[in-house]
Amino acid sequence: MNEYDTQVASGLLSHQGYSQAESEDEADVVIMNTCSVREHAEDRVFGRLGMLGKKKKEKPDLIIGLMGCMVEEHREKLFKRFPQLDFMVGTRNISELPSIIQEVSKNRKQVSKIKQDGISIEYSDLVERNSDFYAWLPIMTGCNKVCTYCIVPITRGIEVSMPAHEVYREASRLAGEGVKWITLLGQNVNSYNGTNQLSVGAGLPSPGRGDLAPTIHGRVGFPQLLEMLCEIEGLERISFTTSHPQDATEELFRVIAKNPKISRRFHLPLQSGSDRILKRMKRLHTYAEYKEKIDLMRSLIPDVSVTTDIIAGFSGEAEEDHQATIQALEEIRYDSAYIYKYSLRPATPAAKLPDDVPREIKSERNQELLEIQKKITIEQNRKSIGQILNAFVEKISTKAKKGTDNNSCLLPFLIGRTDHDKKLVFEGGPSLIGKFVQVRLDDTYHETLIGTLIS
């Protein structure tokens, strides 16, 4: 979501005549888009603000701004702590960014724009995407869950879903511009609950379908939204992140199974394999209930790739809880996992709990989980060696060396993504960028797949 917000901000500023500076020394305006999920991310922002304060003494007209979740969390306290900070923009105020910079430039006073309600998603053709063929598409924001460690409900607010007809229209517009793959975004994306006003003859065209549009009326859940988007011609792949186990339903699994356009990667955070810790986190499920959903998903979508999030060293975590998480990794065998040390966030419910796992123990447990998962990931990937994979070609690799084909022509290494959202590197011509190709998997290197172009 933060990457999408950055693209929105960049597009808005470009439309107003700003251009990206070659370096920070040449910049007239420096904006940091922030995240509050982990303490480390905030510490980096504080450090950068300190360095920018020194730079501002040398260049008094420099304008420094913050946007994103840290603004929602800390608000005006940041102005007091960092007088060099000129403006703050909340997650629901991004469209005001150009006027805010203009106001600061004119009056040289600190400006804060932070809404308390509304939605932080505004669809616009001004979004400055990094790719002509791939796009983020936020469909909801906020979260109604009560996970004790999570700051999202504080920084992003309660769940608000974009109307289904607006999501459909935006996805159709993107497909019309040549986008082949979209990723639907939301802090709890599969709890999407939007309204729909589309009907036959609604005048909201889908590329290749004239003025016909889906005829679902009233409330639209996430499975129904996916089915609507699968109808858009030109749109070849749909993925989404992130999901909560409570909203990962059999209906959703069945929709994915019958629609080949939907990515075969399903990211479902577990956080801990211990029921005691899951309860302390208020995750609303036991490990057995979670695993039952994974088993059902795999039975309905045999080729699905499951990934997850794990927190090491949460409040009260004993050695037996850590061992339960190890057992969960070994039983479920995720294709990959994001594993982090617990970071206490002020204002969350868990802030009232003792952060009682020593730092060195957190690090040890985190490293052990990472090593176990690394081994599992390699083993999972190597199962596919020799298979023909479908891959979407994203770009030319800047790191890999060039190879030579049978005609002694130099071919670059291309980076593609499989239907399971895994990185795949192979030799091929630049004309393949933005297309789906067939690649035989020959080898793996860490989490990267290495293959040979078939067609």
Image (tube, rainbow, N blue to C red):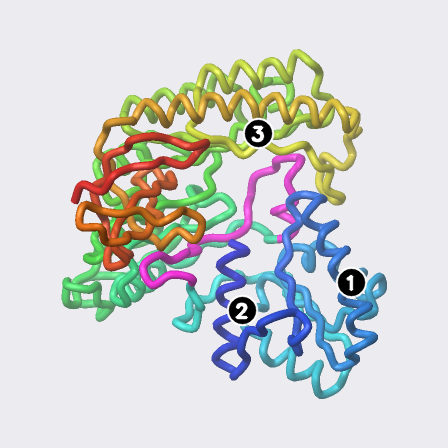
**Whether residue 80 is situated above or below residue 256 in the rendered picture:** below
Label 2 or label 1, whichever comes before in sequence order: 2
Q: Which mark is residue 310?
A: 3
Q: Residue 245: x percent and y percent? A: 47, 31
Magenta residues, start to end:
130-155
Q: Secondary structure at mark 2?
A: helix
Q: Is residue 341 magenta?
A: no
Q: Residue 308: x percent and y percent? A: 49, 31
The residue mark sitting in front, 2 or 1, is: 1
Tell me what residue is drawn at x 58 percent, y 72 percent: 22
Which residue, given by chain and number where applicable, does mark 1 sit on? 51
Report the side of 220 relative to 36 (left or right): left
Q: Residue 399: x percent and y percent? A: 45, 49
Amino acid found under the numbered disc labelled 3: Ile
Q: Residue 1: x percent and y percent? A: 51, 54
- Return the residue nearer the eye: 106 or 440: 440
Q: Secondary structure at mark 1?
A: helix
**Whether residue 196 is situated above or below residue 20 in the rendered picture:** above
Residues at marks 3 and 1, CA–CA distance in whole angstroms: 33 Å
Q: Is residue 139 magenta?
A: yes
Tell me what residue is drawn at x 43 percent, y 73 percent: 126
**Whether residue 49 is situated above or below residue 324 in the rendered picture:** below
Quadrant in which residue 47 is drawn? bottom right
Label 2 or label 3, whichever comes before in sequence order: 2
Q: Residues within 10 Å of mark 3 (few under 14, many from 20)?
A: many
Amino acid found under the numbered disc labelled 2: Ala
Amino acid found under the numbered disc labelled 1: Met
Which residue, given by chain and number where applicable, does mark 2 sit on? 9
Report the side of 409 relative to 183 (left or right): left
Q: Residues within 10 Å of mark 2 (few under 14, many from 20)?
A: many
Q: Quadrant of the C terminus?
A: top left
